[in-house]
Amino acid sequence: MDYRDTSSKGFSPKHKVNLGFKLKTLADKLSFRFLTHYVSETNSTVTGGGETKGYVMADLWLGYQINSMVEVSVSGYNLFRDVHTETPEGDVIDRRILGSVRIKF
């Protein structure tokens, strides 16, 4: 199927790449994860068609295991760009920073 012929494809980028890694240090108490996503530009025939620019998105996660029951973490999503859309008429994806505490019982 020819990528340039979008008449029957709906929404489909030509290229999509995900890459990530996880690192544990300090006697398995400190954890770090990095994940990046690349999506090439896309033409869409869904909802009237249109084009979505390609984008790169990077996510970071840092966690610390306080004891066997409690872990605290902070996550950052879409850190390289302020905003992007994944479809021509889709929701705007913006930068987010989240903190969390996980308690195991």
Image: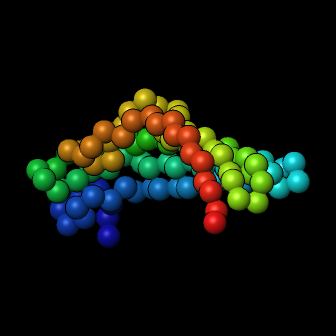
Q: Quadrant of residue 104?
A: bottom right
Name which residue lies at 27% across and 43% down.
Answer: 91
Q: Quadrant of residue 2?
A: bottom left
Q: Is residue 41 left or right of residue 11?
A: right
Total numbered labels placed on residues in the image: 0
Q: Quadrant of the C terminus?
A: bottom right
Name which residue lies at 17% across and 56% down.
Answer: 45
Q: Is residue 80 above or below residue 44?
A: above
Q: Is residue 82 above or below residue 50?
A: above
Seen from the viewer's position, the closer of residues 92 and 51 is 92
Q: Is residue 15 left or right of residue 7?
A: right
Residue 100, percent from left and from top: 56, 45
Residue 57, percent from left and from top: 50, 42
Name which residue lies at 16% across and 50% down.
Answer: 49
Q: Is residue 12 above or below residue 79?
A: below
Q: Is residue 101 above or below residue 84?
A: below
Residue 46, percent from left and from top: 17, 56
Q: How is the image coloured?
A: rainbow
Query: Which residue is most to the left?
Result: 48
